[in-house]
Amino acid sequence: MTAYFKHTSSMKACTLAGKDSVVVSSVRYLKFDKNDIPADIRISSSNDYQFTLDHNSNASFVLIGSTSIKKSGSSTSETIFQFYDETNSTYIGKRGSLASNSGSSSTDQQDKNPCYRTAAVAVILASDFSGADITVSLREISSTGTIDYAFEPTGFENHSGFPCLQIYQSK
């Protein structure tokens, strides 16, 4: 999927498509297509779940991340997720959450969302870098119920939410 990209005189922005999540060392990471990062956005990734912000850019970044879940059991499911600063080993920004209703039809899913949907948001200022790159990821903090995180869009999903990562870079 091609990423949406917008550039203004002092702000650059792009949206990366979500991919199936991955569990590494018992941590669930939300994944996004690193190949969609435009060349002039100063972020790199060697995998699809950790993104390195370039301190040499002297830029500030705003990250907005969301995921998708599909209830695979008979009860309501919910996931809580937040950006994690891998470099400094700390959660940053505001948590996001997404719930999936206990019904099985797409109408049941829509009844639950977007009312209870929030995105995770992190702001990394140019002054936060202290002369080194910062690597961030979007991690699941907790979940309830039985959740299917797989998301391969076909246009007729019974999923709640749409997984994407929005990146805004100043300068």
Image (cartoon, rainbow, N blue to C red):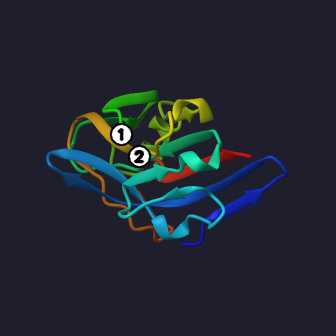
Q: Quadrant of residue 99?
A: top left
Q: Which residue is mark 1?
A: 87
Could one spot residue 143 in this view of the protein? yes
Q: Quadrant of residue 20?
A: bottom left
What SS does tag 2 mark?
strand
Q: Which residue is mark 2?
A: 135
Residue depicted at x 54% and y 59%: 16
At label 1, the amino acid type is: Thr
Contact between labelled residues 2 and 1, with CB atoms less than 8 Å apart: yes
Q: Is residue 7 left or right of residue 3?
A: right
Instruction: State the residue in front, 128 or 46.
Output: 128
Within 10 angstroms of label 1, few (less than 14), some, or many (20 or more) residues? few
Residue depicted at x 30% and y 53%: 149
What SS does tag 1 mark?
loop
Residue lying furthest front = 131
Tell me where residue 87 appears, x and y as whole percent.
35, 39
Q: Is residue 81 left or right of residue 2?
A: left
Q: Is residue 92 left or right of residue 36?
A: left
Residue depicted at x 68% and y 53%: 13
Pointer 1 or 2: first along the chain: 1
In the displayed structure, would residue 58 be above or below residue 106? above
Instruction: State the residue in front, 120 or 83.
Output: 83
Residue lying furthest left = 25
Q: CA–CA distance between discs 1 and 2? A: 6 Å
- Locate the N terminus by quadrant: bottom right
Within 10 angstroms of label 2, few (less than 14), some, or many (20 or more) residues? some
At label 2, the amino acid type is: Thr
In the displayed structure, would residue 49 be above or below residue 132? below
Residue depicted at x 53% and y 38%: 114
